[in-house]
Image (cartoon, rainbow, N blue to C red):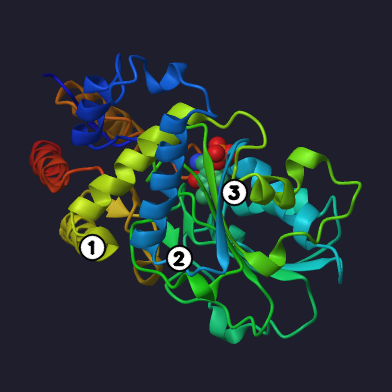
């Protein structure tokens, strides 16, 4: 099998075990005589798939009973609108942190619905750090506080949460959900597009505290109201059935590997293999501030655009693909989600060392 090491930021690599199981079940899922793709979302078999997926996610994230898990569509990007539509209902105001392109998009969308106070921004230095939340005052009245917990493009993450008092904290966890242990109760809403650490594109996971559901105005379109999806257990209309099925297999895979604690341990080791090399290299350098480095997305650069292009090209011939960085940062970015094996990072670093020796 000639699979490559795929460092794509998303859609991203998936566990081989999951893909193998899906391929075994492709034509005949559990004796139903059909593929999950061909199955009614109202069937018993699918009911079991979605319920099991939810329970496994609840188990691995230790989601308290007063939180609902919703399987929605529209990507993380639709949440940029659904969140203000459903939450910006009382003070009509939100406090937001501007830590990257995805925060900026969420800010622009929230502005359509009410007042946005940007508490801090790292835009002046291409978002290569997270502003210090301890020096900020989040005590002013607002409906909620919003952060992007991991910034996919710039490779930064919040290692400390803002002190928000009794305001709900909303987090876009698209690129670091399931990668490290978190306390769900610290948040009002956690949401994530699936295509990085969860499964295929098409499903968006929303974990929402019960009391935050049902606040939307009657004028909010039915499909954009959390209440609609809560009442129908994410089956108001046809959900992205196949994506939910694969997500369920990924949750089982995480469970079997020892849960999020085990994932976090491996993720720290894995990221350190690359960071340690970036810190000692005389040719490559990491672009994110050390204190805020992401465990999932690692951007790095070479001294010239020519060397960056040469590295990406040579890497590809060795089976390390999708390493090109986002245009706003340049250089390279290695996305090393849960499913990237340690061996992939070790081999990448070995290749980087060879490249350094050849191009000193
Ligand atoms: N938020 C973050 C942090 C992301 O990385 C992305 C996608 N790369 C998005 C939001 C947008 O996700 P989607 O394409 O699912 O709308």
Residue reaching furthest to the right: 219
Res 293 quadrant in image: bottom left
Q: Earlier in the sequence, mark 2 or mark 1?
A: 2
Which mark identifies residue 102?
3
Q: Which residue, given by chain and number where applicable, does mark 1 sit on?
A: 268
Residue 31 image offset from top left, x and y in percent: 28, 21
Distance from Cα at disc 3 to Cα at disc 2: 25 Å
Mark closer to the observer (2, 1): 2
> Is disc 1 placed on a helix, strand or loop?
helix
Q: Quadrant of the N terminus?
A: top left
Distance from Cα at disc 2 to Cα at disc 1: 23 Å
Q: Which residue, given by chain and number where applicable, does mark 2 sit on?
A: 63
> Is disc 3 placed on a helix, strand or loop?
helix
Residue 79 image offset from top left, x and y in percent: 66, 47
**Left or right: where 49 falls relative to 136:** left
Which mark identifies residue 213?
none
């Amino acid at each position: 099998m000639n699979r490559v090491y795929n460092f794509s930021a998303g859609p991203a690599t998936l566990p081989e075990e999951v893909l193998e199981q899906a391929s075994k079940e492709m034509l005949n899922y559990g004796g139903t005589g059909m593929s999950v793709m061909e199955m009614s979302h109202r069937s018993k078999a699918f009911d079991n798939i979605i319920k099991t997926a939810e329970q496994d996610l609840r188990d691995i994230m230790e989601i308290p009973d007063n939180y609902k898990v919703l399987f929605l569509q529209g990507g993380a990007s639709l949440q940029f609108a659904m969140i203000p539509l459903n939450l910006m209902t009382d003070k009509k105001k939100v406090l937001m942190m501007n830590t990257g392109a995805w925060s900026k998009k969420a800010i622009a969308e929230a502005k359509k619905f009410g007042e946005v106070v940007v508490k801090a921004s790292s835009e002046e230095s291409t978002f290569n750090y997270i502003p210090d939340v301890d020096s900020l005052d989040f005590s002013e009245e607002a409906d909620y506080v919003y952060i992007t917990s991991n910034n996919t493009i710039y490779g930064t993450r919040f290692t400390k949460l803002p002190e928000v008092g009794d305001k709900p904290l909303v987090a876009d966890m698209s690129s670091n959900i399931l990668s490290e242990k978190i306390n769900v109760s610290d948040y009002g809403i956690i949401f994530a597009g699936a295509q990085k650490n969860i499964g295929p594109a098409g499903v968006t996971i929303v974990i929402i505290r019960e009391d935050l559901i049902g606040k939307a105005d009657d004028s909010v379109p039915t499909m954009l109201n959390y209440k609609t999806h809560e009442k129908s257990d994410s089956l108001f209309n046809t959900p992205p059935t196949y994506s939910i099925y694969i997500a369920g297999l990924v949750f089982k895979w995480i469970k079997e590997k020892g849960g999020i604690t085990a994932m976090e341990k491996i993720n720290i080791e894995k990221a350190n293999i690359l960071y340690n090399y970036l810190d000692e290299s005389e040719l490559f350098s990491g672009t994110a501030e050390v204190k805020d480095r992401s465990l999932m997305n690692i951007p790095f650069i070479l001294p010239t655009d020519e060397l960056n292009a040469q590295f990406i090209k040579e890497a590809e011939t060795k089976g390390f693909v999708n390493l090109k960085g986002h245009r706003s940062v340049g250089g390279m970015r290695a996305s090393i989600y849960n499913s990237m094996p340690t061996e992939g990072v070790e081999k990448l670093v070995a290749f980087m060392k060879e490249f350094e020796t050849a191009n000193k």
